[in-house]
Amino acid sequence: MIRAQADRGVTIIFSTHVIAHAERLCERIAIIAKGKVSFDGLVSTARDRLRPQVHLATETADGPWRKALPDDVRHEGNWWHFTLPDSGVEPLLTALIGGKAGIRSLSIERPGLHDAFVAIAGEDTAAEMDAPTAEELI
């Protein structure tokens, strides 16, 4: 119903602490944290503040292709997790294929609005939102 009204050109002011609802229903958002507007703009602009995350599984654990992985790489078993480099995915793929890494799985995930909210408002504010209220504890 909200999206249908918005599609008709109706201006809707929607207030929620459920980030998933805001991401699904809103084009523009204002993030208010500790009584101040921390962000005001498009949902896509908020999300674009964070770089995409790469999740890579390889057959081999080492080789010349490792030089293509950025400094923030985390290695867990056969999986590598890191921020997509500014150079993009093409140089990474070239290094992986040329270096015979044996790509088993590769996904690139754009950060969601919740991730952007945490980056904009701060981890403490996000944790406060996730904490149960006194009414929820009763």
Image: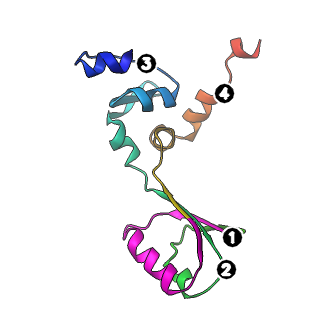
| Residue receiving disc 1 | 78
| Residue receiving disc 2 | 61
Residue visible at 33% across and 18% down in the picture:
4
Image quadrant in which the C terminus is located? top right
Front-most of residues 17 and 101? 101
Instruction: Determine the secondary structure under disc 3.
Output: loop
**In front of the other: label 4 or label 3?**
3
First reached walking from the N terminus: tag 1 or tag 2 = 2
Which residues make up the magenta segment? 79-105
Q: Amino acid at mark 1?
A: Asn
Q: Position of residue 71 (x, y in %)?
A: 53, 72
Label 1 – label 3 distance at C-alpha: 42 Å
Residue visible at 48% across and 43% down in the picture:
112
Residue visible at 50% across and 81% down in the picture:
97
Q: Position of residue 82 (x, y in %)?
A: 54, 64
**In front of the other: label 2 or label 4?**
2
Instruction: Determine the secondary structure under disc 2.
Output: loop
Label 2 – label 4 distance at C-alpha: 40 Å
Whether residue 95 is in magenta: the answer is: yes
Q: Is residue 28 visible?
A: yes
Q: On the picture, is 64 further left or further right than 28? A: right
Label 1 – label 4 distance at C-alpha: 34 Å
**In front of the other: label 1 or label 3?**
1
How many C-alpha atoms fall within 10 Å of the one at disc 4: few (<14), some, or many (≥20)? few
Q: Residue furthest left?
A: 9
| Residue receiving disc 4 | 131
Label 1 – label 2 distance at C-alpha: 7 Å
Label 3 – label 2 distance at C-alpha: 47 Å
First reached walking from the N terminus: tag 2 or tag 4 = 2
- How many numbered dots are placed on residues in this image? 4
| Residue receiving disc 3 | 15
First reached walking from the N terminus: tag 3 or tag 2 = 3
